[in-house]
Amino acid sequence: MIYKNFQDMGLSALGMGAMRLPVIDGEDSRIDEPAAAEMVAYAMEHGINYYDTAWGYHEGNSETVMGRILNQYPRSTYYLATKFPGYDLSNMDKAEEIFEKQLEKCRVDYFDFYLFHNVCEMNIDAYLDEKYGIFDYLMKQKEKGRIRHLGFSAHGSYDVMKRFLDAYGEHMEFCQIQLNYLDWSFQNAKEKVELLNAHHIPVWVMEPLRGGRLASLSAEDSDRLKALRPDEDVPAWAFRFLQGIPEVKMILSGMSDFAQMQDNIHTFETDKPLDEQEKKVLFEIADSMVKHIALPCTACRYCTSHCPQELDIPMLLELYNEHCFTGGGFLAPMALQAVPKEKQPGACIGCKSCEAVCPQQIKISEAMADFAEKLNG
């Protein structure tokens, strides 16, 4: 196992995420605890020392199950991370109640790593609102030693991350973002890494395989990679890409079965970052994947000055592309919760004034109608 230095600690470069544990009969809330325990035992034996859970994973059962499993091991042999569930605005005034319950569920006296969960457009105002006292409460827990390292995770835009960092950046020790070779451009991950680097905040990676999307490529794309590294499996390429980013200290993988864990641990026995030619091929594959689905908006903003509804069309098209590429998901609906109804896709009147000036000749009115239908479906 490769280890990364973080302050005075040696963290396994691969961490076990507990969001996609094996389940019974396909029911997310019914974790197959013996199977999960077998995976943790194998992870421990092969050097993984970082375990990441959260209040809402597996419909609230991930912390409880991981607490029971990890309780079988000496507390000094693993690092445990969980998060304050700010993705639900009804939790904002319950920081103390939730934190105490998390300690109980996880059967620990302290968390090695604790995060503001999912800083995004929907909750940034509440996270920064002093009336909730979330930041002050978590800082007090850190002073008491009940939180050893405080950070945040973010699915929001660059601008949302910047607002959070402007307020709390000097107190944040790490940040967890969605980072992989597809989102390097598609979700502006490169700029987010640069922003964190400017604040001297190391990067924790989530979704290294884009929910499994990058673990299974087309036969043609797989052959291109095989020709460059005959002994490397397709999923390993995504991890090798991340190994070449110096700011990355932790790569989390939500492994859902024993075979995935074996394969990933095998990959992290060696550090083999990609060279420039290999990265070029990966980015070409990523561009091809996106172009098959995404609309080619360049955010030139010619359209916005011609929209009688004053919609932020480039922003909406960016969310539409994400929603289409993922086949749904929570990111676009979550981001749109921060957008007034009269500025959402359904507010488009189909006048096509924007289309008349679009250099990419995007059928914007059709995209807005389709987006509104997908969101209401």
Image (cartoon, rainbow, N blue to C red):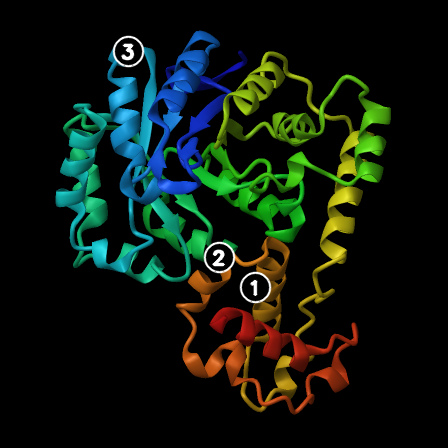
Q: At 73% across and 26% down in the image, what residue appears?
A: 274
In the image as oriented, which residue stretches furthest toward the front? 25
Report the side of 326 relative to 89 (left or right): right
**Residue type, mark 3 in image:** Tyr
Graded by Cα atoms within 10 Å as few (under 14), some (14 to 19) or many (20 or more), the crowding at tag 2 reads some
Alpha carbons under labels 1 and 3: distance apart: 43 Å
**Which residue in the protein does label 3 denote?**
73
Q: Secondary structure at mark 1?
A: helix
Q: At 26% across and 9% down in the image, what residue appears?
A: 74
Res 331 label: 2
Q: At 34% across and 37% down in the image, what residue appears?
A: 30
Report the side of 277 relative to 310 (left or right): right
As drawn, 357 above or below 164? below
Q: Are marks 1 and 2 in contact (CB under 8 Å)?
A: yes
Judge whether residue 158 can be spotted in this image.
Answer: yes
Quarter holding residue 144: top left
Q: Residue 361, position in %: x, y?
A: 79, 76
The disc, 1 or 3, on the residue closer to the chain's N-terminal end is 3
**Residue type, mark 1 in image:** Leu
Q: Residue 44, position in %: x, y?
A: 41, 12
Alpha carbons under labels 1 and 2: distance apart: 8 Å
Res 319 label: 1
